[in-house]
Amino acid sequence: MVEKLSKFDVSDYLTDETTIAEYLNAILADGDQDLLLSAIGDIAKARGMTQIAERTGLGRESLYKALAPGAKPRFETILKVLQGLGINLTMTPA
């Protein structure tokens, strides 16, 4: 019997605020910008890219491009997306 594996998609597991916060904190601890953009994209996908585009005033295609690994989005864009996702940034001393 051949086992069939499905593709893992982290956005399927980002179902509540606590999980999303823990996911982002783990990514931030790594310090990888591409990974952070990808994680924000995962969260946007979990919440609905169209809905986030409407909340931020950005186009869906622009969001996909801005959150792709290797992208260099403006900080303003990232803040808009985070606000559209209902995420607040909090700073603490290292």
Image (cartoon, rainbow, N blue to C red):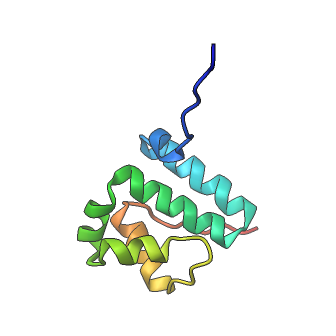
Between 92 and 57, the residue placed more toward the observer is: 57
The spot of residue 71 in percent (x, y) is: 57, 79
Between 4 and 84, the residue placed more toward the observer is: 4
User: In the visual, does 21 lie left or right of 46?
Assistant: right
| Residue at horizontal 60 percent and vertical 69 percent from the top | 91
| Residue at horizontal 55 percent and vertical 40 percent from the top | 7
Between 6 and 85, the residue placed more toward the observer is: 6
User: In the visual, does 71 lie left or right of 82?
Assistant: right
The spot of residue 12 in percent (x, y) is: 46, 41
| Residue at horizontal 60 percent and vertical 65 percent from the top | 36
The spot of residue 55 in percent (x, y) is: 26, 69
User: In the visual, does 66 lie left or right of 37?
Assistant: left
| Residue at horizontal 56 percent and vertical 40 percent from the top | 8
Q: Quadrant of the N terminus?
A: top right
Q: Quadrant of the C terminus?
A: bottom right
Residue that protrudes farthest toward the top in the picture: 1
Residue that protrudes farthest toward the front in the picture: 1
Q: In the rendered view, would you say 3 is above or below 85?
A: above
Q: In the rendered view, would you say 46 is above or below 39?
A: above
